[in-house]
Amino acid sequence: SQQGEEDPQALSIQEGENATMNCSYKTSINNLQWYRQNSGRGLVHLILIRSNEREKHSGRLRVTLDTSKKSSSLLITASRAADTASYFCATEITSNTGKLIFGQGTTLQVKP
Amino acid sequence: DAGVIQSPRHEVTEMGQEVTLRCKPISGHNSLFWYRQTMMRGLELLIYFNNNVPIDDSGMPEDRFSAKMPNASFSTLKIQPSEPRDSAVYFCASSSQGSIYGYTFGSGTRLTVV
């Protein structure tokens, strides 16, 4: 069964708006990661947040982690058409193995 | 570095045939993962290796699937015999254990079994 569940499954916004995607998971984690997948391509790592961190930034990306609620969010600010892709959260549930379990993903469409 | 290299990019085969997918991880990465992606089931972890040793193959669907990593620079995923329900995109990914940079994925192999 999937460790992570993402919400919403699909999101459509206008260029310049912010996009927020949420991820919930079931078991304790070592870290949580977000990936992007463009259509027909492999996944690209965006950001990693450790279980003892609450917020992390990278460019236009902001990730939060709430371990008490077992949830994370990915915020993309000032979205661009090039941000159109599927976004996945992935959890490392066992320390020192690096094994990641991926959620089902959120499909984001940014309209020009 | 050229990234994680997978071959072939596309494979169309007839049911019952043997299929071999290949992966070259990034040099220096000590972990390698095989995933399968379908619309219905999303991304499923099939098997992963640490330092060329298989650690967890609980995701391998059945005995028709096997994976090897004979050295640090090469891995194969074999399906024998193949079935139409094996049709999917198969991804290989590698990482350095403990890295903050996560996995590096290959471009995938799109397998179609007819």
Image (cartoon, helix red, strand yellow):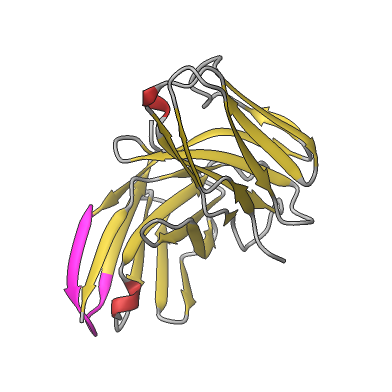
Image location of residue B5, percent across then percent down: 64, 53
Q: Quadrant of residue B89?
A: top left
Relative to A48, B50 lies left or right: right
Image location of residue B51, percent across then percent down: 79, 40
Q: Quadrant of the N terminus of chain B?
A: bottom right
Image location of residue B68, percent across then percent down: 71, 30
Relative to A56, B77 lies left or right: right
Image location of residue A55, percent across then percent down: 45, 69
At a point 28% along the width and 78% down the height, the residue shown is A81
Residue A58 among those drawn in magenta = no
At a point 34% along the width and 53% down the height, the residue shown is A23
- Whether residue A94 is visible to the viewer of this picture, yes or no, is no
In the rendered image of this protein, does residue B32 appear above or below residue B27? above
- Whether residue A101 is visible to the viewer of this picture, yes or no, is yes
Q: Nearer the viewer, residue B87 or B47?
A: B87
In the rendered image of this protein, does residue B104 appear above or below residue A83? above
Relative to B32, A54 lies left or right: left
At a point 52% along the width and 54% down the height, the residue shown is B107
Q: Quadrant of the C terminus of chain B?
A: top left
Magenta-colored span = A8-19
